[in-house]
Image: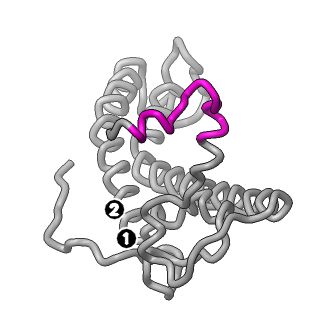
Amino acid sequence: MAEQEIEDFDAGSVSDTACMLDHVHPPPYSIDDQPWPLEARGVCEFWGWALLVTAFNFALFLLNFVLMATVFCIVLLPTIVVVYFGFQCHSRVLHSGAYYCKTILDDNSSSALIILGFVLMSPLIVIAMVTYCSVARRLRLFLCFVPYSRATYKGMRWTGLGNPSGCCNGKEWDSNLKAWV
């Protein structure tokens, strides 16, 4: 730094908060993509848009959660069924009076079902996670989350990263890119 710049910068006379307020700029990733200059919103307008962005992101979070729960329930259904019947027919756990518990399953076979269910759970959890990630990636659900800078500045696009056909359509990614799980 030049000596004049050091003299002009008097840290004792300006608080940290004042320095931060003087240098409010939009995020760097949004400057190049915008066709016009951005300006900050008013306080009431900011809170309204912030609530809208929060509601949209929360709805998207719920959609992701329901999708993940559905995929996990479908993939883990064999394990759930096997462990359920194992615990239902074991004499030290529930010892149901159902016909299949009296004729087909004794304590040894119930224990075998419980063990088999828990052994099958690990690979099925991996398969469920891979399936969920694949579906979420195909639907591009993670690109739909709206940053709070959209509430802070006027004039920002609400669609994807440059593709106006929908919120989840971002820039095309490399089709050669593969991830192994």
Q: Quadrant of residue 40?
A: bottom right
Mark 2 element type: helix
Q: Is residue 50 above or below residue 36?
A: above
Q: Are marks 1 and 2 in contact (CB under 8 Å)?
A: yes
Q: State the image coordinates of residue 72 (x, y, percent, origin top left).
A: 45, 49
Q: Residue at image x 70%, y 56%?
A: 54
Q: Is residue 11 above or below residue 73?
A: above
Left or right: residue 133 compared with residue 176: right
Instruction: Please state which of residues 157 and 55 is positioned toward the viewer in this rendering.
Output: 157
Instruction: Please state which of residues 179 and 160 is positioned toward the viewer in this rendering.
Output: 160
Q: Quadrant of the N terminus?
A: top left
Q: State the image coordinates of residue 141 (x, y, percent, origin top left).
A: 48, 65
User: Which residues are drawn in magenta?
Assistant: 4-19
Q: Residue at image x 41%, y 25%?
A: 110
Residue lying at the far top of the rendered structure: 92
Residue lying at the far bottom of the rendered structure: 165
Residue lying at the far right of the rendered structure: 44
For disc 2, the marked residue is 134
User: What coloring was used for the rendering?
Assistant: one colour
Tag 2: Cα neighbours inside 10 Å, few (<14), some, or many (≥20)?
A: few
Q: Is residue 95 above or below residue 105?
A: above
Mark 1 residue type: Arg
Q: Quadrant of residue 13?
A: top right
Mark 1 element type: helix
Q: State the image coordinates of residue 166 (x, y, percent, origin top left).
A: 52, 82
Report the disc number at residue 6.
Answer: none
For disc 1, the marked residue is 138
Instruction: Please state which of residues 134 and 90 is positioned toward the viewer in this rendering.
Output: 134
Left or right: residue 58 compared with residue 76: right
Q: Residue at image x 63%, y 55%?
A: 62
Left or right: residue 176 compared with residue 125: left
Q: Quadrant of residue 61?
A: bottom right
